[in-house]
Amino acid sequence: MYKGKATTSNPAPQTVESTGLRIGAFDSCRQDHLFISYAWENCALADWLVRQLTAHGYRVWCDRFQMLGGEPFPKIIDEAIKTRTFRLVALLSRHSLQKPSPRKERTLALNLAREWGIDFMIPLNVDGLKPSELPWDYSDLTYIPFEDWAAGLDQLLRALVKAGAPRLLSEDLGRRLAVETFLPQHVIENRAETLHSNCFAFERIPESLYVIKWHEEHRRPDLDRLSVVWPYYEVRAQGVLLAFSLPPSEVPQDAYTVADRFLWRERDKFLGVRSRDMVSNLLWQALAVTLVSRGLKRDNRGLLFFPRGLLRKNKIKYVGRRGRRTWVSVVGEKRFRGRPYRYSLAPDFQIRQDMGQDFVAQMKIRVLLTDVKGKRLDHATSIARRKHLASTWFNHHWLNRVLAIASFLSKGQPRIVLSKKEDPVILVSVPISGEVYTAINEINLKSLRQEVAASTTGWEDGEESPEEYA
C-alpha cells in the first residue's frame, strides 16, 4: 500500500559516478517518473504540484514525499534522473537559481537533453524571471509561466500529454494518494460508519398550486414586502402569481381572484415554465420566510444571518448526534493579526432534484464577517478571515452547525413546519444519512488537529469544546 507521508529530511544523495553505472539511450518504458527540482523556499508550490500531478495519474518524485504512487524517493539522485525520470520539472525562481542542489539537477538534465536529443527539462518560471536573469545556456528553453498556478498547471499538463508522459496511476488511485498526503497514517479504515449529509428530505409538499390574478393594477400590493411572509412565483408576462396558499389576510380578498388551481405533478409546464421549477423556487422561499420569521436578518446582498442578541449568549442549544445536550455559537468574535472581527452563521439553503428523491433541501453554512461595529468586511479582507475562522472546523464541526440550525428551525421537534397554512410544507429535521464502508479514525486525526490549533491564533478560543463530539 502506498503511503503519502511527507518527510523533512533525506540521506545525503550519492552520485552516479560512485556506482559505476553507465548510461545508455533514453528508455521511455523504464523512465516513467516526473522529477520535481526546486528550492525549499518554493516548497509550497512543490507540494501543490506533486499532489496535482499525482491526482492526474503521474508518478512523481519529490524529496518532500517519501512514497507517492511509485517507488520510494531515490537515494542516488543522479541515477534516478538518468535512468528512471521521464521529465525533470524545474521550478525556476530567484531562490532556486542560487541553490547548488537544484542547479546541479538542472545542469544534468540539460546535458541529458543534448545527449538524447529531447526536451528533457520542463522549466516553470515561478517568479516571472526576465531573460536577463537566467543563465545563458537556458536561452533556447521554452518556459511555462507559473505565477498563476492554475493556468501554469494547465499548460504543464498539455506539455506532458504532448510529450507522451506515462500516466500509470488510475484516476481513483492518483486522487486517493494525493489526498492521503494531507493526513496522518491509518486515518482511513475499512469498516462501516454512518455518513451524515447536509441534506434534508421533504416529508410533505402541497400537491396543488393557486393561480392568483389581481383585479386591478392599482390594488396590487407591494410584492417585495409581501414576499417576507408569503412565498409566491410571479409570471410577469401573464400578470399572475403562483403559490401553495392564498395571499395572507392583510391582502383584501376582493383585490384578487383565483384564476386556476391545478395539480402541478400532472402538468409539466404552466405558462411556459416547468412546474417543478416553480415548486423548487416556492420551497426555497418557504425556507427563507421561516428563517426571517425566526428572527434572522437579511443583509444588502440577500444573505440571511443570525444577528447578535437573537439568542441567549448567541448560542443554539440542541441535542447532538450522540444524544447529548450541547450548544453551538452562531455569533462570535475572533482576532486576526491582533485585530478583532465578528462572524455570524448564515444558513444558505438550496433545493435539489438530483439526489434520487422528490425534492431535497441542502443546507450550506456560510458566515457573515464584519468589524466590531457591524460593518461588512470587503471581499479581500473577508477571504483571509474566513480561512482563519474555518481552518479548524473539521467535518464534525460543520455537521454540528447543521444539526444546531435544523434544531433551531424545528424548535427541537422531529419536523420543520415551513408553513402553518391549511396545506403546510414539512421538512424532516434530521439530515439524510446512510451506512458507508470506509471510515475515518477520529483518534488518529487528533495530532493533526493539535498541529493546526497550535499554528492558528485564537483557535476556537475555548468556546467550542462542548460540541467537539456531541
Image (spheres, grey):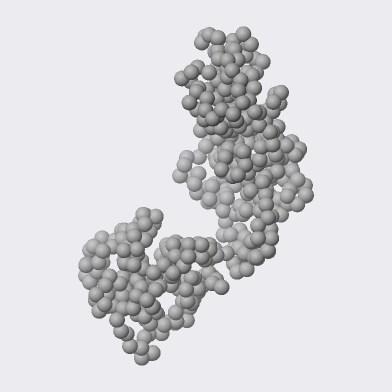
Instruction: Report the number of numbered marks.
Output: 0
In which image quadrant can residue 139 be found? bottom left
Position of residue 346 in the picture relative to residue 410 (left or right): left
Residue shown at the point (50%, 74%) measured from the top left: 66
Viewer-closest of 13 and 110? 110
Residue shown at the point (28%, 62%) measured from the top left: 143
In which image quadrant can residue 90 be found? bottom left
Viewer-closest of 448 and 228? 228
**Residue 348 visible to the viewer:** no
Viewer-closest of 264 and 291? 264
Q: In the image, residue 457 lies at what x, y percent?
A: 58, 55
Viewer-closest of 206 and 401? 206
Quadrant in the picture for the N terminus = bottom right
In the rendered view, would you say 105 is above or below 460?
A: below
Q: In the image, residue 443 lies at what x, y percent?
A: 68, 64
Position of residue 214 in the picture relative to residue 412 (left or right): left
In which image quadrant can residue 58 be found? bottom left
**Residue 378 visible to the viewer:** yes
Position of residue 281 in the picture relative to residue 55 (left or right): right
Residue shown at the point (50%, 44%) measured from the top left: 382
Q: In the image, residue 186 lies at what x, y percent?
A: 62, 68
Position of residue 289 in the picture relative to residue 48 (left or right): right
* Residue lying farthest to the right in this orientation: 324
Q: In the image, residue 56 lies at what x, y percent?
A: 44, 62
* Residue lying farthest to the front in this orientation: 266
Residue shown at the point (52%, 28%) measured from the top left: 269
